[in-house]
Amino acid sequence: MSTGTTATSGPIGAAALGDNNAEGLKADARRERLRLAGLCSPAAILVLVLLVIPVGWLFYVSFIGADGQFSLENYERMIERKSYARIFQTTFEVSLLTTALCILIGYPLAYFMSQLPSRIANLCLITVLLPFWTSLLVRTYAWLVLLQKRGLVNTWAMDLGLWDEPIKIVHNMTGTLIDMVHIMLPFLILPVYGSMKAIDKDYLKAAANLGAGPTRAFWTVFFPLSAPGLFAGSLIVFVLCLGFFVTPAVLGGGKVIMVSMKIASNIELFVNWGAASALGVVLLLMTVAILWIAARFVRLDQLAGQGH
Amino acid sequence: MGKHLIITAAAAALISSTALAEDKQVTIASWGGSYQDAQSKALFQPASEATGIKVKEETYGGMSDVRLQVNTGAVTLDIVASGSGSASRAGAEGLLEELDYNIIDVSDFYPTLKMKYCVGGDVFSTVYAWNTDTYGDAGPQSWADFWDVEKFPGKRAYRGKVAGALEPALMADGVPPEQVYEVLSTEEGIDRALDKIRELKPHIEVFWTSGAQHAQLMKDGEVDMTTGWNGRFDNAKKDGAKVAYSFNQALLDYDCFAIPKGAPNKDVAMEFLAEISKPEYQANLPKYITYGPTNKAAYDLGVIDEATARALPSHPDNAAMQLPVDIEWYAEWETTAAEKYQEMLTE
């Protein structure tokens, strides 16, 4: 722009011109901000209408008692009745175990895939993604058929002589975990694989060059570089697990009761919506707390990207 | 000319008002599936033909839907089919219209199969069923047997909700059927029933949550014994499941029809309920599903053959062996009991 070219022409009017310049830049920045706000507004309004207002409403309703008055009874009930604490405990236990198992299975698989030639790796990725295209309900019932007393797993294992009596692998925590890990695995593998692919192989060569063995190079160079992806994936898996409903309901044998199931039963059971809303609020706050703690270890915006 | 117009207008008004009178209609919501098919074929369609009341059928998600409609003042349903317990609680909550038993004739009804807000539509039983491969035909004959894991070793399934779950436990604990609800009407009584279930819990493999589930558990041989709804076991048996059940000490329960508060066609709905409660409609229900009529007179019409009648929960011989579910108890105690029940489940 013209102001720009004159500013470079000589030191004489530089101060005055600099002021002009600053004003112009400020105006530019203002305009840009406005335009940006304009572009963001549809999304912002959507979030406001579909998220902020309903969640605010949820908070409000959770403080309304059975008689329609403001009351803390919905929260008091959760403290008085031991089942609520146990249900939250189960929810976090199931979520933690699922996340841990996903890491144990998913990390090595992602590592293996990241070392393959890209054509084969892509094929592997498709097989990882394949379960995504099958309904969760179908997969859950399929596991029920496979895992039950006279299911394929038990009958084949007994035919092969692996065990004599059918073992209990469904209608309990085990069955629930098997299905949840199956469902959640892609959510872990994808970010981990992404962050592994982004690691420059030269780093490993450099490590080797400096005398590190393969194990040492992996743990001191490769693993720390893949850690953001692993962390992001684990967090996604964990948070998604907290809200699971179908899997524990079908495969838990009625004994693995998670928060979402209790929310459903409270809607049926209590006259007011508050009883269920309070559970939602507590779960939401706990999840936010976990994200907040997690944010102290890793930047949350990395969850959106793939580790870098 | 002007006079002529007035007469035409008056005539038109007259015609349209008679047309309105003929154009009576009700919207009925039920549970869908083969259950609603049976209701539709045996009750709704024939009654609609006989009365000229048009019927629009919908499916719904239970009394929480009614609660939402009534609370927001947007009631679209005229009649809803419901379980007796939830109808009782919805009535107490003020969600339902009081039924007019001067219009609906219930003089031949079993006295326990109707209430202020809901008139019985069919009778079912909560029974204990057993795998005939495991125990033969001489399976458990009482709730005490159901609890007896030495005489009848094997895995059990039990309901995951409190409805129909405490009564058997008390009977197994030696409480005579007629005193069950008396005992249950204190927190100690509820705890006594829960302790009895705790005793059996190590042998309970699954706490079931739906009729389809308990039927499937028996079909797959996943458990050897379960509680459940008799009609489902009959269907499972037709599909080849090795299952038998007994009516002894079973819980006699019923589904009923209610009118949501502020229903748009409340009066027509009342008239329609009067029609479908008549024995001639009720007698046809067992043709389509193995649930019995609530109107005793239905047995006298000769429509239900002897073999079918004997298999129905509401057959006098079968009904005599059972404990009728006490709706009033559920209205008062279900919430308390349900919370305690969940406590037991999560232990």
Image (spheres, coloured by chain):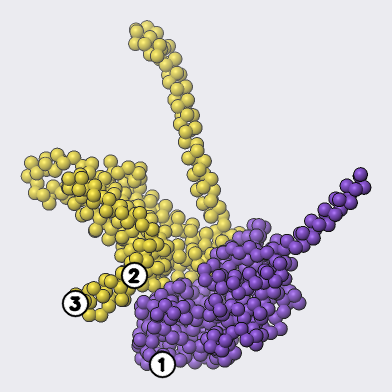
Chain colours: A yellow, B purple
Q: What's the distance in space between the residues labelled 3 and 2, CA to CA? A: 21 Å
Q: What residue did someone put label 1 on?
A: B138
Residue in the foreground of this view, choosing between A66 and A268: A268
Q: What residue did someone put label 3 on?
A: A161
Q: Is residue B141 above or below residue B184?
A: below
Which of the marked residues, 3 or 2, is nearer the chain's N terminus?
Answer: 2
Where on the picture, by quarter, is residue A183?
Answer: bottom left
Looking at the rendered image, the quarter that the N terminus of chain B falls into is top right
Residue in the foreground of this view, choosing between A54 and B254: B254
Mark 2 is surrounded, within 10 Å at the Cα level, by few (under 14), some (14 to 19) or many (20 or more) other residues, namely: some
Where on the picture, by quarter, is residue B138?
Answer: bottom left
Q: What residue did someone put label 2 on?
A: A145
Q: Amino acid at mark 1?
A: Ala
What residue is shown at x 31% (from left), y 76% (from top)? Answer: A149
Q: Report in which chain the residue with disc 3 lies.
A: A
Q: Amino acid at mark 3?
A: Gly
Q: Is residue A142 above or below residue B305?
A: above
Q: Report in which chain the residue with disc 1 lies.
A: B
Where residue A217 sits in the image (x, y, percent)?
13, 47
Residue in the foreground of this view, choosing between A272 and B245: B245
Q: Amino acid at mark 2?
A: Val
Q: What's the distance in space between the residues labelled 1 and 2, CA to CA? A: 29 Å
Q: Is residue A301 above or below residue B298?
A: above
